[in-house]
Amino acid sequence: MKKLLLTMLLVLTSTLLPAQFMRSYNRNIASLQMVVNDEAFKPAVITLGSDDEINFSFDELSHTYHRYTYRITHCNADWTQSELDAIDYLDGFNDRPIEDWENSVNTTRLYTNYQFRLPNDDVRLKVSGNYKVEIFDDESESEQPVAMFAFAVLERRVNVAARISGNTDIDTNRSHQQLSFDVHYGNYNIMMPATDIKPVVYQNRRLDNCVSGLKPTYMTGHSLQYVHNERLIFRGGNEYRRFELTDPYAPGQNVDKVEYFEPYFHAELYADKLRPTHTTSRDENGRYFINTLQGYGSAIEADYAAVHFTLNAPYSDDGDYYLCGDFNGNFFTPANRLEYDTSERCYRTVQMLKLGLYNYHYLWVPRGGNRGFTARSEGDFYNTENEYLIMIYHRDFGGRYDKLVGMLQLNYELEKN
């Protein structure tokens, strides 16, 4: 059984391009984080020409130094590479080394923490839009990146106003939430607003159910209205489950027990059940935060633990459950898929995670599908507190890239009040 668990921990994830998220392509790269201006709840968006900074960090699970470099690429609204050359969007040079690194201290799982910021003295960003930052190991024979971060740069030219309601076009205060929004562009010159404006909408930073390719319902004066659009009806889901483990010698919230089996700590969470009713417990909408009560600096003193998740649910052969949250980018990969334990009649997975507080969901993905659903495991409820991010892109007539010209982050619970 222990060999099986360790094998599950070492599954290498497949590659996908995320939006405003982090992705590890190597089993030894963990705990990716991207924080704007040291404010954990802000989206990964900085304003062009401002003093905003994004801090990027990750762990390599050893004390062996690696010469990592980062490469910045400008992308279109759909995250395909734009037509711009590096000289068009960078003031500085690509393939810069990551020089800020520290070995972990007093941890059973050895790791090295690497960090860098953008913009910095070597590199500044010249245009708005989407960007990806790929991390390469200069000492590796592979030409593939070991990790990737994706973020955006904003030049605000339009204003966005939005509303969320549990009274939707398909049900009333039951399972869904409907988003409506207006884009006010005033004197900003847009040749064909209905087609040149490209909105993209995310719910809790999930990628599988994000919405793009929207067309306005109405055009009035200098504004576009996106209302009564069925594509803007989102399943409500439920509040995120959460656990907290900040001390390997003392189980925290939702942790049944912590034991040390050579060579790692193992944390057994209380078994989760299917949720037929709405939960009112506090959550952070899928985020995670590194923290430890040991030592003084969490970045290099927080240990790792093999965290055991259990979902009591009947076996079904028409799809799979995936463990999802910001800590794994909400990706449906073999490493995040739960395996059914026939002897215990439950689903299980083990994840090697750094000490801290974690939000998570179990998402059901039908066989052959690429979208996760909350109904089977978490339930769908209109009154769930969810976070929405609206991104507005614009491409000039004859332009070679999509500008990010507007953005709005809003919370359904705050909107209700």
Image (tube, rainbow, N blue to C red):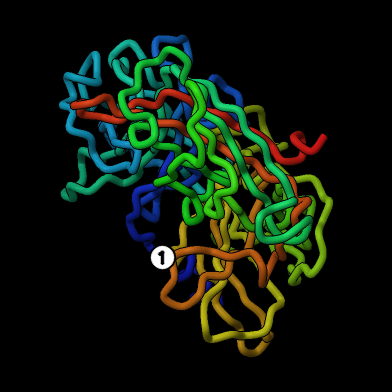
Which residue corresponds to the image point at 44% horizontal and 71% vertical from the top-left?
369
- Locate the C terminus and report the quarter of the image it occupies: top right
Return the x and y of residue 22 as percentages of the image width and height.
43, 43
Q: How many marks?
A: 1
Residue farthest bottom in this picture: 343
Which residue corresponds to the image point at 17% horizontal and 47% vertical from the top-left?
143
The residue closer to the viewer here, 18 or 56, is 18
Three-letter amino acid code of the residue under disc 1: Val
Q: Is mark 1 on a helix, strand or loop?
A: loop
Vertical position of residue 351 compared to residue 88: above or below: below
The residue closer to the viewer here, 372 or 281, is 372
Return the x and y of residue 302 as percentages of the image width and height.
60, 40
- Locate the N terminus and report the quarter of the image it occupies: bottom right
State whether residue 72 appears in this view. no
Q: How crowded is mark 1: few (under 14 residues within 10 Å), some or many (20 or more)?
A: some
Rendering quarter of residue 69 = top left
Vertical position of residue 38 compared to residue 248: above or below: above
The residue labelled by disc 1 is 11
Which residue corresponds to the image point at 46% horizontal and 20% vertical from the top-left?
185
The residue closer to the viewer here, 54 or 411, is 411
In this rendering, position of residue 8 left or right of residue 348 = left
State whether residue 50 appears in this view. yes
In this rendering, position of residue 38 left or right of residue 48 = right
Return the x and y of residue 167 as percentages of the image width and height.
74, 51
In this rendering, position of residue 275 left or right of residue 40 = right
Return the x and y of residue 249 as percentages of the image width and height.
74, 51
